[in-house]
Image (spheres, rainbow, N blue to C red):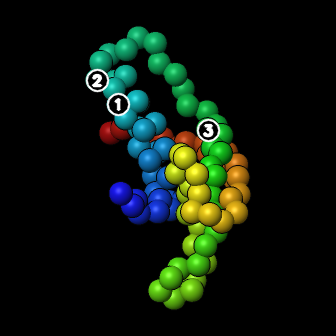
């Protein structure tokens, strides 16, 4: 079964969502021990290809298990969450 390529923006959205879910779970469950989130170091394997429709370059996250046959590139970047206060 073919999967649609995951964009870098989608991958970052997933990371943001998972960190948010963990924070909300701790609040809802009344966890006494919580962790502050500092810098999150992200490393993602990507391929740069061309869109088959218009030829524009596309950056795609490589799924676990390999690539579509092209060269892959590892990008690493820090993300520091900024959490808005409630209320």
Given residues 51 and 69, the one toward you in this image is 69
Residue under label 1, please give it. 24
Q: CA distance from mark 3 to mark 2?
A: 23 Å
Q: Nearer the viewer, mark 3 or mark 1?
A: 3
For disc 2, the neighbor class at 10 Å (few under 14, some 14 to 19, many from 20) is few
Q: Which of marks 1 and 3 precedes in the sequence?
A: 1
Is there CB contact under 8 Å for labels 3 and 2? no
Given residues 43 and 32, the one toward you in this image is 43
Q: Is residue 56 above or below residue 20?
A: below
* Callout 3 secondary element: strand
Q: CA distance from mark 2 to mark 1?
A: 6 Å
Q: Nearer the viewer, mark 3 or mark 2?
A: 3
Residue 42: which disc? none
Is there CB contact under 8 Å for labels 3 and 1? no
For disc 1, the neighbor class at 10 Å (few under 14, some 14 to 19, many from 20) is few
- Location of residue 67 by image quarter: bottom right
- Location of residue 48 by image quarter: bottom right
Residue drawn at point x = 70 percent, y = 52 percent: 74
Residue under label 3, please give it. 40
Residue 28: which disc? 2
Q: CA distance from mark 3 to mark 1?
A: 18 Å
Q: Is residue 52 left or right of residue 22?
A: right
- What percent of the width, then of the height, locates residue 55? 57, 86
Query: Where the N terminus falls, by quadrant?
Result: bottom left
Q: Which of marks 2 and 3 precedes in the sequence?
A: 2
Residue at the far bottom in the pictured view: 54
- What percent of the width, then of the height, locates residue 29? 29, 18
Given residues 29 and 10, the one toward you in this image is 10
Q: Is residue 37 in view from this perspective? A: yes
Q: Is residue 41 left or right of residue 55?
A: right
Q: Is residue 15 above or below residue 30?
A: below
Given residues 28 and 65, the one toward you in this image is 65
């Amino acid at each position: 079964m073919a999967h649609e390529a995951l964009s870098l923006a989608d991958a970052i959205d997933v990371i943001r969502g998972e960190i948010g879910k963990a924070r909300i779970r701790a609040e809802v469950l009344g966890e006494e021990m919580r962790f502050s989130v500092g810098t999150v170091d992200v490393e993602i394997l990507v391929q740069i290809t061309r869109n088959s429709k218009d030829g524009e370059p596309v950056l795609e996250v490589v799924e676990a298990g390999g690539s579509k046959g092209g060269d892959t590139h590892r990008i690493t970047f820090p993300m520091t969450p900024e959490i808005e206060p409630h209320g």
